[in-house]
Image (cartoon, rainbow, N blue to C red):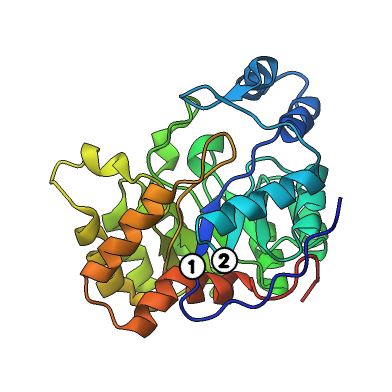
Amino acid sequence: MTRLAPAPPTRVGDVVDAHCHLFAIAIFEEYVAAHPEGAPRFREALKERKFGRRGESIPDMPAEEMAAWYARRLADAGIAKALIVSVVPDSEYTRRFIGAANGHIHALCNLDPRDPGAPALLEREMAAGFRGVKLLPVNRCFRLSDPACRPLFEKAAELGAPMIVHYGVTVDPGGDLRYADPIDLSPVARDFPEVTFVVAHFGAGYLDQVLKVAYQCPNVAIDSSGTNNWMDSMAVPMTLAQVFERSITALGPERVLFGTDSGTTGPYRSWIAYQQRETLRGLGLLEGDLDLVLRGNAVRIFDLDRPGGEQA
């Protein structure tokens, strides 16, 4: 297969999706092999070769073929670059994928911040071309404020590794809302100002808490990814326009990132991209501020215009 040509730097007017997923049979196989006594959700998905609430088929193709396929679907949707947020630690398939993607698609690695080996794994993953870390405290049931996590944050500060963190509600049946409150991020973001923390999905039902933490800590940002149907569970009705307006007013346009939460078990979520772009335009943002949200912030925070597979 012909290797993808290097991705050119993005330009004003381009759109970068800062929160996507990569699901493949090989990734599920890696996770199940690493958890021989557990991982029932991934084990069942691998058996059925389907994943998610809709039971969509998991693609099965080599990493190099997957990279070319993914790049085509992004281009067809008008997306210049994307950032994959990994949910499986230490994935050789994902390493091969980002190498083959050649800067069109980047990735964040996944790990358990409590693991004593997490700092060393992060260093290896950053050297392999990953652009930072995705953490899942509500899904994996840990608190970032746990002292056991501090060595990871020290290493992240040393390496300049930004993070996306999923707080709030989740469709994961194993999720635990005791770990969902972004207020837990406050002492971590305070103590590690060199690390940028992007809270996914507008905080997924915890927008108020995210905005308060971001008021205290200028290294806290937010992304817009997903259907944002958490709004349906709010006691006080909210619209997407109100959520964007509150976020941009509180954090400034420099700390809000666009994303769709698209995966590979279904089509790219073009309808979410359209909805969010039209909502942002309806707010009457200056063109420069609109570009920050749709492109510039993701490129700056995650260094997405550096060629793929190269260490800074």
Residue at the extreme right of the image, as rendered: 1
- Identify the residue at the far left of this view: 236
Is residue 154 visible in the rendered structure shown here?
Answer: yes
Q: Amino acid at mark 1?
A: Val
Circle 2 packing at 10 Å, graded few (<14), some (14-19), many (20+), is: many
Residue 71 image label: none
Percent coordinates x, y for residue 59 in the rendering? 67, 32
Q: Position of residue 305 (x, y in %)?
A: 65, 75
Mark 1 Cα shell of 10 Å, populated few (<14), some (14-19), many (≥20): many
User: Between residues 174 and 238, which one lies in front from this camera angle?
Assistant: 238
- Secondary structure at badge 1 equals loop
Q: What secondary structure is marked by label 2?
A: loop
Left or right placement of residue 127 versus residue 199 in this view: right
| Circle 2: residue type | Ala
Q: Relative to 71, say whether 189 is above or below.
A: below
Label 2 – label 1 distance at C-alpha: 6 Å
Front in this rendered view, residue 230 or 65? 65
Number of numbered labels in the structure image: 2
Look at the numbered discs 2 and 1 and tell me whether their residues touch, using CB distance below 8 Å: yes
Q: From the image, which quarter does the C terminus lie in?
A: bottom right
Q: Position of residue 6 (x, y in %)?
A: 76, 70
- Find disc 1 in the rendering and name its residue: 15
The residue located at (34%, 63%) in the rendering is 277
> Hey, which quadrant is residue 132 in on the image?
bottom right
Residue 150 point in image, percent of width and height = 63, 58
Tell me the tag on residue 80. Answer: 2
Inspect this view and state whether residue 150 appears.
no
Q: Is residue 22 above or below residue 55?
A: below
User: Which residue is pictured at 64% across the width and 71% down the height?
Assistant: 304
Dividing the picture into quarters, in which one does residue 63 lie?
Answer: top right
**Left or right: 306, with 248 as reference point:** right
Of pointers 2 and 1, the one earlier in the residue sequence: 1
